[in-house]
Amino acid sequence: MNSIIIVQMAVSGALMGLVYALIAYGFQLTYATSKSINFGQGELVMLSAFFSLTLLDAGLPYWLMVPGGLLFGAMMGLVVERACVRLSLEQKSEGWILLTIIFGLLSFSAAENIWGRDDRPFPSPISADAFNVFGISITPLELSVAIGVFAVMGLIELFKHKTLLGKAFEAVSADRDAAELMGISATRTIMLSFGLSGMVAAMAGILISPITTVGPTMASALILKAFSVAVVAGLDSGFGVVLIGIALGALESLTSFYLGSGWREAPGLILLIMALALRPNGVFGKANIRKV
Amino acid sequence: MKKTLIASLLLGMFAVPAMAADAIKIAITGPFSGGSAPMGTSMRDGAKLAVAEINAAGGINVAGKKKMIEIIERDDEGKNERGALIGQELASMSDLSGVIGSVNTGVVVAGDKHLQEKGITKIITPAAGSASMNQWSKAGVKDLSIFRFAADDAIQSAMVVEDAISHKFTKAAILYDSTNYGVSGHDDLVDQIKKQGNKLAVVASEKFNIGDKDMTAQLLSAKAGGAQVILIWGIGPEMAAVSNGMAKLGMKMPLIGGWTLSMSNYIDNAGKNGNGTLMPQTFIEEATTPHVKSFIEGYHKAYNVTRIPSPVSAAQGYDAIYIFAAAVKQAGSDDTHKIKLALEDLREPVKGVISTWKHPFSKWDPANELTHEAFRRADVVMGKIQDGHVVFAEQADRQRLIKSDSK
Amino acid sequence: MLKRLLLLRGTELVALVLLASIPLVVNNSYALGLLTLLTIYGILLIGLDVTVGYLGQVNLAQAAFLGLGAYAAGLSVTVLGFGIPAALGVSMLIGLVMGALLAFPALRLEGPQFALATLSFSALCTTVLNEWESLTGGAQGLSLSRPAMLGHAMKASGFYWLCLVLLALVWMAMRNLLSSQWGRAFEALRDSPIATDAMGVGTFRHKVAGFALGSSLGGLAGGLYAFNFEYLQPQTFNYDMMVVLLLGVVLGGRKSLWGAFFGASLIVLLPNLLSSRLLFEIISGLGFLLAVVAGGRGLLKKTTQPFQAIAPVVAMGILVAGGFMVENTENWRKAIFALMLFSVVVGLPDGIMGFAAQYLARLFGIKSAALPAASMLDDVLPANTRDLGVLLELKNLKRYFGGVKAVDGVSISIQKGHVHGLIGPNGSGKSTVVNVISGLYAPTSGEVLLLGKPLPAGSLFSVARAGVSRTFQNLQLFGELSALDNVMLALKDAYRIPVLLVLLGFSRAEDRRAQAEALALLELAGLADQARVRAKDLTYGSQRFLEIARALARKPELLILDEPAAGLAHPDVAVLVEMIRTIKRRGITTILIEHHMDVVSKLCDQVTVVDGGQVIARGTPDEVNRDPQVIKAYLGVVPDEIIPA
């Protein structure tokens, strides 16, 4: 009995962890090209989820809604890049941190007023009825989240390595100045990364909404975790976020069970501060040599 | 230089916004944004509906003169700091007749002391935990201007525990959110279990945080302890996550909790997993009587919705305004102190949508908080969730309410 | 000069008197409540400005320190029975200690990582306060009542005056501190941690000190917060509050006491401004006009980019239009706040007070304070008696990066008083050699001896303290600091007053002396007339000279010049040569890395040539110029491996 409970918790925690990982991946995409991240990413997840829900309410079938939602996410990503990030990058300032926080604030308020303050269910064609594997309950819905996470990340990694545009992306990530000298437009590549990142956020919104429900605050708890996962794994760690995400999710569940649910987040937070102190660039991040 | 500008701006703001003379000014406060907004906004909208009806009928007859009601809205965001500031602001308005509102216990504790200091009459509705009233009884305050128009946690928790015991359960798990509301609800439940003869063993006490989506760990604790029923105290959609988690883990035991389970963010998000969930209710959105019917339809029409986000909050806000208006009429004055005295001794029954209120409050006695509490056990019924709606858990309650209305 | 003092201090005094007299004039509990909160937030934001403005880090822990301070004060009163002064002392101490503790792991972090570390700390604090129910009362909160002070019950107005007095004290102390070496060190850290270390100003202790200082002010504000509200709950001090604080600092203006105060006013008053429709319409209208005027002017004068001018106009336009369309502005409060902030951050990067300060300075003709006369150069850099012997010795020095052997067994010895040239083709390892000497990298093996004693390995700071000073191939100036401050920061042995006395304002005389000395060095670099210009606004050539002046301020035994002529125009190269000659006459031993052979020939006593990480020739400039191996190395034999810079 007891070992089944532990495994059940680890599995449920890990599934939550995969969601952290997907959102964290959105952070990585923009960090790679521009060394900036969108602090309003959680609101992007939320806006896209609401928009997708509106498409569904308008009578669009689920499978047509998905591309619509993704397109919306990508567009919002571009808006963030244009309005909040580009100027700061040109001025080499860190103004983007504040501007993206402001974007989040605006989105939150707008969503509250446009879609209401209440959490709402998000229908999904995939069943939420659990099935049993060796005594462990898993729902097809949870499984679909896991598959979706890997599919999205896999496709984008494939795109980065197999297409010309993707290679430009890699080039700007590696050395922005050198890439510009080779005739690659860094500005366009950064736009691309924000578009992709917005799309990842939308995908996250569509995937998790049937489980978490849709509401203005739906992502505010998730986003802190995702941010932790991204930084602890390393903002340039690629699939590293998956491992760290799963680990954090499972750790939270187990802490909750053994230490009491009020302390759920404490060990994760302490580990996080320690991990940062020991490896500032993340567990899977590349250590950079100080240059002068 | 910049400074003097700020200072003058500051001074300018202290002036209470100019309003039509000869109106009765009532402030409505509550969380209109943030996590507990569904309760705050439903209460506000219910209250505004009542105000609109009263004004449409020509206002309140105050000592022979018809006066309109004017509303001042203040969003406390569920934040204590805002609550304290709003309390100070309202306390400094010289012509305010009263205040209606509040959801969060912390906000009430931080803000009401300023109102009490100036003797401004306030009716707390739709919620706020035990501390909102017992802070005054503990301090032994002799003359209190704060009233509560909400089913207090003691009544609710008594009903929840009663219900669990009546189903012959012996092992219960308590799940509660980590806010003031959840923690004090947990304490009330434990207290009630003791009072009702320790017939329930608490096999797990587990917290969850606002925003938590995965309740597996808490539920497995309950399961491991062999719980037969889960008692829950929380506010928002997290409780839906509990129901969904139970379904996933194949835990088929009933869920019983506070009235907040009737809010749409639980019902909608738990979907079919919410069926059978039980909770005490002061109001059920079912057109049992013509009066209730017209309220529900009025609300739907005025705010263009098909269902009230939190029917209990809306109904309490609505009734609170009618009770307040009755006190104004009886006092024959818009003076907040005279209104307070009238509230403590309302002679005419007030017909509301929850009940017909007969002498709801009496003179404050610090030894007996019930003097400033409107709700009694009999005003509260057990509600049950069925296919997305709250229905009467006991048909007897339904019949009783219809009968009492026709009287 | 009197005018400057009168205006600046006068404004502060007038503001203080005005604020203090409001309770005498207006008898309104609400006004008093707002004003009290304003002073508390003022202290809080001044503290936050140390990390966000001066240290340049996004600090998301200030709300947590507010909470810790509040609970410390609350528990001091309820559990320990302390009075107000002692409780506030405890609050400050808690802030100081916890701030220092958090600074240790957070020290190595920058940007997003630092933000996350502080954010995690905040979440941890909330969890502990919420879960430690036996002490804090958990989610049900902690009620306390304000104890009497000096035998008198503290009424609202009395408490307000207490807060105001504390704000004034904090204000003065911070003004003293931030205009001293400490303030310069904080800003230097932000612009270039590497150069801060290389100038012998420890990044470590300044970062810890700055963070602890800001946190202790957070703690103090927390103590006052507890006595103001008399009821605390852990959830109050959350991320939402932190975002508001951060935005308050930025909106008001970073690196400015007035900015912090203005930011605090906005935070406290804005929700109230919006609750009146008329006020909202006036404010949004004024904001729109300001955006149009400022943007239009910027565009016409071409001082701003189109986006910077247009975006605020659009944002404020949305605000005005939205005001007409929306029924209830209260519902949209956050969005309104966001639009205003967006306009300010984009349109006025220095914040509202930063913008206003520039404008007012011009309006009233306020000039910077006058500088003292420069010291004699002989006093600053006494000419060295020419004793002979070896100053620096490298013994079989190696430094590998993974498989790349950047330096592979280099041995050099450098005579006192010499200018020693270190040359070689790109990627030959010469920069790595000086990076190892100056402590940026630890050697893989081998020895570096200064006057026969080993230099500390791998610590810029310790090496700088041991008497080695350097410039950088890619400039590492403190861009936001003036030329004068750049040099003053590096001055050796100029600052001895302990920090407590600095807070009380006893460092002025010392600072004055440092200014005079720094001016002497700026004269040497030909920059005396540009002392007040920000380093990043200097011409490229002047920036190079400024770095040399700054390095000289260390009064070094050994000066390392890493490609000082790189990118210089021809006339500037001549100036540079003269400058190095002057330095040589003072007897300062110098290592000169240089590509310009004519410069090397003119200046160097000895030259070492490295290639592929090894010494291929040594001797006088003439000797190495004729060396066939050197000629081969320079004329195009490409090394097999690429070596990191």
Image: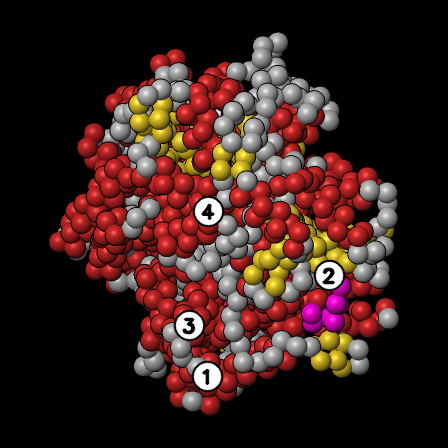
Kindly identify the amino acid type of the residue bearing the numbered disc 4.
His
Residue C542 lies, in percent from the top left, at 31, 53
Q: CA distance from mark 2 to mark 1?
A: 36 Å
Q: Are marks 4 and 2 on the same chain?
A: yes
Mark 1 belongs to which amino acid?
Trp
Q: Is residue C396 above or below residue B73?
A: below
The residue positioned 43% from the left and 41% from the top of the image is: B47
Classify residue B246 as left or right of residue C603. right
Q: Disc 4 designates what residue? A: B291
| Magenta region, residue range | B247-254
On residue B254, the disc is 2
Q: Secondary structure at mark 3?
A: helix
Evaluate whether label 3 is on the same chain as label 2: no
Depth check, front residue: C617 or B295: B295
User: SS class of the residue under badge 4?
Assistant: helix
Which residue does the image show at 24% across and 30% down from the upper left?
C366
Residue on which disc 1 sits: A63
Between A185 and C377, the residue placed more toward the observer is A185
Residue furthest front in the image: B407
Q: Is residue B251 magenta?
A: yes
